[in-house]
Image (spheres, rainbow, N blue to C red):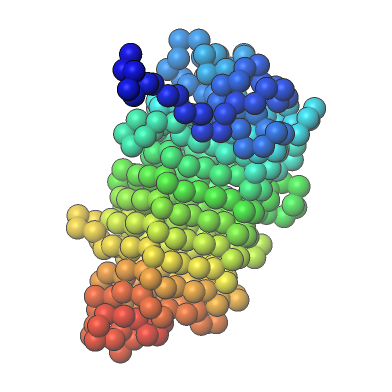
Amino acid sequence: MNVQFPLVRANPWYPGQIGIAGSDNTLGLRERSTGVVLYVDRGHPAASDAGDGTNPGGPFLTIQAAVTRLIAMHAISSMVGSVIVIQPGVYTETVTVPFTGCPASCTILGGGSNTLRPTWTSAAAGADALTLGAPGWEVCNIYFIGPTLASCIRVCWLLPVVTYRANLTFIHDCFFDGAYAGIRGIALHGAPGDVTIANCVFKEFHVAANTARAIAVTSTADACPLECVIVDNIFTENDNHITPINGVGSFNASFFLRNIFNNGGGLPTFQYIDLRLGGQGRNVLSGNTFCGDYSNVGGYFDGAVPSSWVGNYAEDVAEAEVSAAGITIAPPA
């Protein structure tokens, strides 16, 4: 022992709290007293979906088991603010977080850092890896691999409201890898509002017909996504970066800030951002980096109700909508 510099143990981040419903130990992090922490670790020798998952020494085997457990616990006592910690490993699952009976404002958190964070892809072609239907859920620090003919994450707000209402979703610090086969990174299905997508990477979403999309607005009879925030993301080597599907739906009164829209090298981008189909328009795009031809021909589209495209960086200084310094002064035309 060094008498001059003795070992001092700092308090852990979010120290465990005793007495939380469903918790049998003081390990883990808590966000509020009504929540619980559940652990998923498919590589742990004691992992089982038959347990309660509250102990990292006895975790769930699957993510869906943790969600199902939260719903069952929520029927007895409030589980709002709970956290599902997914330990590093490869998870091949199709998971649904429903609106009915599910606690709001919970977190799916990938444990581990950088290459150690968990990898998640769908269990079957045509099935989304994660469908969010409850409000306020957060997803962070996960490496998603794009499923065939489906989305890594589908965020849903559909009528009737009792089915899906995923407003206030927060997706951040994730990597979305299309792997030249995935068709969608994130799909905003119907009219989810106040969705934030931040600090994510979207790469190599590509299919033979060049119709893959990093972020898609899917076709429904409901209104378009409203007042969303798309900030600090990187889009590169995708068939299309942010566009609607089947010519229906786009963003309204949303904010696109400090994103990088690259045209890639090995895979060309056909549409960078398409806002033509939002009935209300009035989006704000500022601080973004727009590569390639800043025009409709190049794959940049505004809506019938104009948005603000002022203060972005564009390399296409030949356009009248771009200043000689490379700053956008008007929507693409």
Which residue occupies the extreme left position in the image?
A: 265
Which residue occupies the extreme right position in the image?
A: 76
Residue 52 picture quarter: top right
Residue at the spot 51% in from the left edge and 33% down from the top edge? 13
Residue 61 horizontal/vertical position (percent): 52, 19
Between residues 63 and 244, which one lies in front from this camera angle? 63
Q: Does residue 327 appear left or right of residue 200 in this picture? A: left
Residue 193 horizontal/vertical position (percent): 62, 60
Residue 267 at least partly seen: yes
Residue at the spot 31% in from the left edge and 80% down from the top edge? 327
Quadrant for the N terminus, please. Answer: top left
Quadrant for the C terminus, please. Answer: bottom left
Residue 182 at least partly seen: no
155 vs 255: above or below: above
Residue 96 picture quarter: top right
User: What is the total number of numbered labels drawn onto the structure image?
Assistant: 0
Q: Does residue 48 appear left or right of residue 323 in this picture? A: right
Residue at the spot 45% in from the left edge and 14% down from the top edge? 44
Which residue occupies the extreme top position in the image?
A: 45
20 vs 135: above or below: above
Residue 240 horizontal/vertical position (percent): 36, 61
Q: Does residue 262 appear left or right of residue 71 in this picture? A: left
Residue at the spot 31% in from the left edge and 34% down from the top edge? 115
Residue 37 horizontal/vertical position (percent): 60, 28
Which residue occupies the extreme front position in the image?
A: 4
